[in-house]
Image: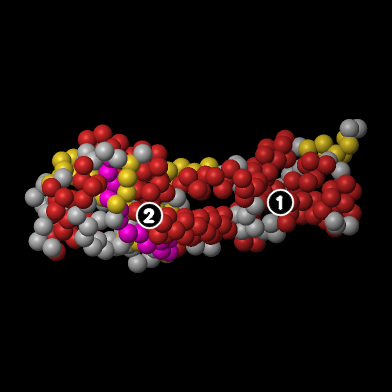
Amino acid sequence: MNIEKIDLNLLIYLDVLLRERNVTRAAEFIGLSQPAMSNGLRRLRELFRDPLLVRTREGMTPTEKALELQPIIREALQSVERALQTLSDFEPARSERVFRIMVSDYTEATLIPALLDRLHREAPGVVIDILAPSDMTFEDVELGKVDMMINRFDSLPQSFHQKTLWRDTYACVLGRHNPVLKNFTLGTFLACDHIWVSKTGWGAGMGIHPGDSAKLGWVDTALKRLGRSRRIKLYTRHYLSAMLLARQHNLIVTLPGKAARVMSKEYDTVIRQPPFPIPPIELKMAWSPLLQHNPAHQWMRRLLMELAGEIDRQSRLEAYLE
């Protein structure tokens, strides 16, 4: 049987006929005349080579073949309805969609709390599944298995769409009783022990070699331009543990400013501007072209851009007041 030669409206007729078991009521439900529905039933009988509905004392009774077809036809029509629903306007307040988003610790500390607060008020059924960079690959994003990535990227596949959420400068975080706070200069900065926090990459790492300054990231690259280097006591991949250890052991951790300001409030630490220039970083959002026109995805992207703008403005104000 060639499906291209079949009037697929007949499947809708059959679904309603088997539910109503009455030609007149089925015609009224769909908005057809009674003769048009009768003609549709005739064509269905020819198509399936079965009476489908037989008149008995109880009314129109489905045949065995019709009862076999009923759940198959219903499932097929529901699949089409779901496909069409994805093309309609997205309704955040009624949605139960799961968004899978890859983020670093930096993004999780700065952007995700604001996102959850907004979802609680505007889209309580929406669920966020946070992934780490090591949980996925670019291919997962390209295939739409992951909705988007939010991170700092050296490079991205050319097919990906991307937006810059904000640019951020660095800040040094110290415990309140760290003695160098009285005279925070490049000399005292370099005299201290430091915590290095990873620029999150992809896949399982193999550890850090202290002598390989080329892989240590923005802070150490900036120092190298000055012909200097810092004494790193601890290497970690987590901002939160870095903040706690900086407070307890008179260590200095140098982080992107937005993360430093958010977490310093929680850990009762002090922020100082780095005593040497460090180039700013860009936080980007990237996603697959497969999701570019998806209404739910478009809504989430707009929301993240709006929240990022609010956070950026607040962070700039706080930095100005420091």
Indicate the position of residue 164 as horizontal and vertical percent values: 41, 63
Disc 1 designates what residue?
Answer: 11
Q: Can residue 90 be seen by looking at this rendering?
A: yes
Indicate the position of residue 20 as horizontal and vertical percent values: 83, 42
Residue visible at 62% across and 48% down in the picture: 122
Q: Secondary structure at mark 1?
A: helix
User: Which three-letter amino acid code belongs to the residue tagged 2?
Assistant: Glu
Other residues around mark 2 within 10 Å, as few (<14) / some (14–19) / many (≥20) = few
**The N terminus - image quarter:** bottom right
Q: Is residue 168 above or below residue 174?
A: below
Q: Residue furthest bottom?
A: 158
Q: Can residue 253 be seen by looking at this rendering?
A: no
**The C terminus - image quarter:** bottom left
Going from the N terminus, do you reach mark 2 or mark 1 first?
A: 1
Residue visible at 18% across and 40% down in the picture: 234
User: Which three-letter amino acid code belongs to the residue tagged 1?
Assistant: Leu
The stretch of residues the image draws in magenta is 162-175
Is 173 one of the magenta-colored residues? yes
Indicate the position of residue 289 as horizontal and vertical percent values: 45, 63
Indicate the position of residue 220 as horizontal and vertical percent values: 17, 55
38 sits to left or right of 271: right
Other residues around mark 1 within 10 Å, as few (<14) / some (14–19) / many (≥20) = some
As drawn, the label of residue 322 is: 2
**Number of numbered callouts drawn:** 2
